[in-house]
Amino acid sequence: MSATSTLAGSFRALRGLRLRFRPRIDRFRGRSAAGVRAELIDDPQVKEAVGAHVSSTGESEAQAWARVHAYAKEIVPSFSLVAYYRLGYFVARALIPLFYRVTVGYEAREALSAIPRSSTVVCLMNHRSNADYVVVAFVLSGEVAVSYAVGEWARVWPLETLFKSFGSYFVRRGYPEPLYHKVLERYVRLITRHGVTQGIFLEGGLSRDGRFRVAKLGLLGLLRLTLKGSAARVVGEERSNAEILDRALVMLTMRHVVEADGLAFRIDRSQEPLLRYYANSIEHLLEPLAGPA
């Protein structure tokens, strides 16, 4: 098969997915991961942060830049429309009904439809289960492709590759180094300016007992910094800050989560290893497949 016919087939597949799902996808998602990393590394504020890091730590400039390249490679995803809708959507459609009966309790359809295509949409949600990523993406699949900030727990093969192909970026929770935070900040501000739809779990982690945890506003603070100032120039258009950001609230409620017993075990025996937590989670995950006792 020639390269031309393969490319034509890829374009037909992409066009078919867009016609079927009609998702809200910004043009920035079409850029290569290498191109986004290059723009991030070339950011003047990242260069300033490298100088500050060298001065404060005594590392060489080459070592500092090696850190920046490693952080950029770790953070920047490689979004694939085909992976998101061919692999992610169909796997979610097959697996979710095995464990959950998903219902939408309330949807402000008119308000959602009124959001301008030029706005950056941020979905703010609570965090009940690690399945939240999949459930929300599945429910919103016909509307938008969501980019999540994912914790380090998912930086294992094949989850890291999958999440990155779905457009998610990784965040080191509680990592103190200023240089890392500057690279992360500049990436979040970059995608916000370019209209990438983001999903943010306000609690910054799973609820251990079903109650809301204290909100962690770090990423929201970065969004606020992005919008601070006069106006933003994005894709050759001048837009005011009020026109850039729209917030969509997503409330997740579950009668039971697969991590429930594992989380309870961790609360009661906080010093015990994580292996038991995952064992309990997997045991509950398989219960619906076992049928009645």
Image (spheres, helix red, strand yellow):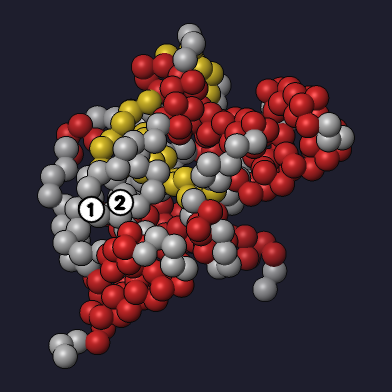
Q: In the rendered view, would you say 206 is above or below 224?
A: below
Residue appearing at x 28%, y 68% in the figure: 261
Residue annotated with mark 2: 207
Q: Residue furthest left?
A: 105
Left or right position of 116 against 59: left
Image position, residue 242 (x, y; %): 36, 17
Q: In the rendered view, would you say 125 is above or below 243?
A: below
Residue appearing at x 76%, y 26% in the figure: 56
- Please rate how many residues cluster around mark 2, counting C-alpha atoms within 10 Å: few if below 14, some from 14 to 19, many from 20: some
Image position, residue 94 (x, y; %): 32, 73
Disc 1, SS: loop
Disc 2, SS: loop
Between 21 and 98, the one nearer to me in the picture? 98
Q: Is mark 1 in CB contact (under 8 Å) with mark 2?
A: yes
Image position, residue 122 (x, y; %): 37, 35
Between 120 and 22, the one nearer to me in the picture? 120
Image position, residue 293 (x, y; %): 16, 90
Residue appearing at x 51%, y 59% in the figure: 154
Please state the total of marks drawn on the protein image: 2
Residue annotated with mark 1: 210
Give the distance between the C-alpha atoms of the residues marked 1 and 2, in whole angstroms. 5 Å
Q: In the rendered view, would you say 153 is above or below 175?
A: below
What amino acid type should be assigned to the residue bearing mark 1? Answer: Gly
Left or right position of 57 against 246: right
What amino acid type should be assigned to the residue bearing mark 2? Answer: Ser
Determine which quarter of the picture holds residue 269.
bottom left
